[in-house]
Image (cartoon, rainbow, N blue to C red):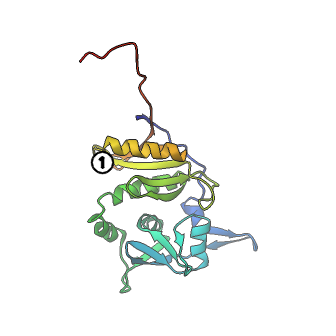
Amino acid sequence: MFPHKFNLPQEDIYLNEKEESIVENKSTSQSLEIEILTGLWTNNKVLIDNSPTAQILHEKNYFGELLPDSRLELSIIEALLLVERNRLKIHTNDGNQIRSDQILTKIAEDDPQIWIRYLVYRDLRQRGYIVRLGYGDDIHFRIFPRGANPQTDIAKYFIFILEEDNAVRLDLLDKITKQSINSRKILILATVDRLGDITYYQLEQFSLPLNKNKELNW
């Protein structure tokens, strides 16, 4: 495995914060202000009732997954970004509004890396990428270029997140590298320092050439 610094391309912003708050109604050529949604925090997910705004979030902005009952289910990371952008308010079952820092504190008890993953998710979205969750602890995110459809198209990058100065097992890096190669994805290692700054590295697999003409002297 050989890591080298990688300048993750900046996509043209698909929908930035200002554009996400205004949606053009093509049938009437009018711009409609999007409402601030209310979500229910349950089982470390956020559920939003079906509405035109929720449909836009899913179909145009690629947030969440639609449930059989037509509600929109957001991961906590997705919900936190929408709260930060003043697009969403989160309530508990008893009807009380809950702040982002309260959610982070609660989840961090079982998932200490939640804040690190959120920083990377937010950075990728700000770069204009469509970001979907990955596969467990091995692949944290899958990202698609602008114009892709996550339902039918294939992700371009796999993202693995590592907090700076934290150790990571070589066998795990080897595993996710092979997984990326087999899936024909570019594997990106996202490192986050103590200030929250993110640096991206591309991780590639290589084999050392074997010199059959020389004997090893131990």
Q: Is residue 96 above or below residue 142?
A: below
Q: Is residue 157 above or below residue 109?
A: above
Which residue shows up at 39% across the image and 77% down it? 42
> Residue placed farthest to the bottom in the image?
94
Q: Quadrant of the N terminus?
A: top left
Q: Is residue 103 visible?
A: yes
Expressed as whole percent of the image width and height from the top left, the position of residue 27 reads 76, 73
Q: Quadrant of the C terminus?
A: top left
Q: Is residue 34 visible?
A: no
Residue position marked by numbered label 1 in the rendering? 194
Quarter occupied by residue 53: bottom right
Circle 1 packing at 10 Å, graded few (<14), some (14-19), many (20+), is few
Residue closer to the observer: 12 or 190:
190
Which residue shows up at 45% across the image and 43% down it? 178
Residue closer to the observer: 179 or 6:
179
Expressed as whole percent of the image width and height from the top left, the position of residue 60 reads 62, 65
In the rendered structure, the answer to whether residue 156 lies left or right of residue 105 reads right
Q: Is residue 100 above or below residue 193?
A: below
